[in-house]
Image: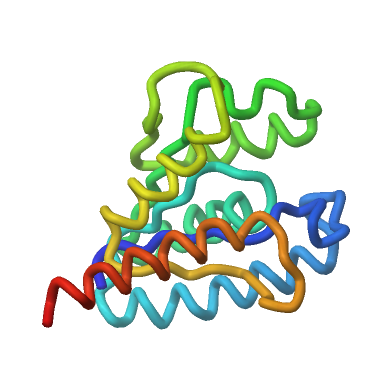
Amino acid sequence: MKSLAISGYKNFELGIFKRDASEAKYIQLALRKKLLSYIDEGLEWVIISGQLGTELWAGEVVCELKSEFPVKLAILEPFFEQAGNWNEANKLWYEEVVGGADYHAFITERPYENPGQFGMRDQFIIENTDGALLLYDFEKEGSPKFFYERAKHFRNKMSTRLH
């Protein structure tokens, strides 16, 4: 696997309101462990969309790993100014991760217009990566459910094509 999408819960969905909270550190340790395993298998690119929480924590981990391993970070945002309404602390966190990215682009090159832009983001990322790592608990629904359902649908569609 050369490219891996990472997504999951937003920090506030987990009741985590500080980027450096102890709970966040445990999530980052788990992400680091999984990423090291994938890097050993040839992972080259990690793709996130720049969402708060899991994705930015993953972005921080990748930025740390880049100094030791040949792995790169791509941020593919759904639309311009995704962080426009975020508080200053979250904007700073986002800007730090974007600053460490090797590639940064927008799926729809326009500002937010409708929720369909999130679906377009998910679809594009799913169709253009080799796999996905998702922080998601089936018993605790939240925003990752939409990514999971799209990825599952895509996998089923591809399985049908391959037979």
Name the quarter where the C terminus is drawn: bottom left
Of 117 and 57, nearer the camera is 117
Please indicate whether residue 152 sits to the left or right of residue 60 in the image: left
- Residue furthest out toward the top: 110
User: Percent from the top left, x then y, of residue 159?
Assistant: 22, 77
Which residue shows up at 38% across the image and 20% down it? 109
Name the quarter where the N terminus is drawn: bottom left
Which residue shows up at 54% across the image and 59% down it? 7
User: Percent from the top left, x then y, of residue 69?
Assistant: 35, 66
Q: Taking 77 as reference, is 149 above or below it?
A: below
Q: Taking 19 as reference, is 156 above or below it?
A: below
- Among the 4 quarters of the image, the one containing residue 146: bottom right
User: Percent from the top left, x then y, of residue 131?
Assistant: 34, 69
User: Percent from the top left, x then y, of residue 106?
Assistant: 40, 29
Of 42 and 158, nearer the camera is 158
Please indicate whether residue 45 sits to the left or right of residue 99 in the image: left
